[in-house]
Amino acid sequence: MGMTASGGGGSSGRGRRSRRSRARPMSDINVTPLVDVMLVLLIVFMVAAPLLTVGVPIDLPETQARSLNTESKPITISVNAQGQVYLGEDLVDTANLIEQVASQAVNGTDERIYVRGDASADYGTVMQVMGLLSGAGYNQIGLITAPVQGQ
């Protein structure tokens, strides 16, 4: 019976202390909502980043070559599996390709040009595009490939 009386007295003392602590302003900052917002933003940017590349869907061949560092946005020419040629995201005819590249080339024939060829695209079409560019004086032509997975 004595334990019941002391337990009741202890609980009333705790009740007074909790009332006092509620009256004080909270001085801690809750960072959980900040972390939640940052994780959501991180996921949004991770999903959106691959969508910001050139929009012509092609399957790039894989090589072990290192990636190049570029300072400015280069001109990108894509050849899809059907042999259609795109300048950026616009479908172009190979007869008008050089004129359209020249209109986008800020540095003239010193402009860096990347050719993206689908892995199942006709080799002759990709070489024809590169030959047209090389014949027009563009000598900084690069082939874009995807790195081999697992290395």
Image (cartoon, rainbow, N blue to C red):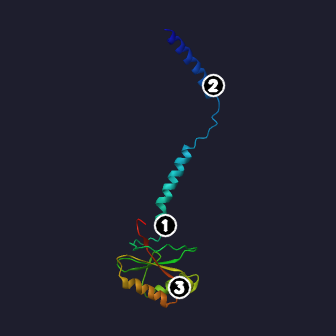
**Residue count near mark 2 (Cα–Cα under 10 Å), binned few <14, some 14–19, many ≥20:** few
* In front: label 2 or label 3: 2
> Is residue 75 shown above or below 150?
below
Identify the residue shown where x is 41% and y is 87%: 128
Position of residue 151 in the picture relative to residue 38 (left or right):
left
Q: Secondary structure at mark 1?
A: helix
Q: Secondary structure at mark 3?
A: helix
Residue closer to the observer: 14 or 56:
14
Residue closer to the observer: 16 or 144:
144
Residue closer to the observer: 105 or 146:
146
Instruction: Identify the mark at residue 20; answer none if there is no mark.
Output: 2
**Residue type beneath disc 3:** Ala
**Residue type beneath disc 1:** Leu
Instruction: Identify the mark at residue 102; answer none if there is no mark.
Output: 3
**Residue type beneath disc 2:** Arg
Does the CB distance between marks 2 and 3 fall below 8 Å? no
Mark 1 or mark 2: name the one nearer the start of the chain: 2
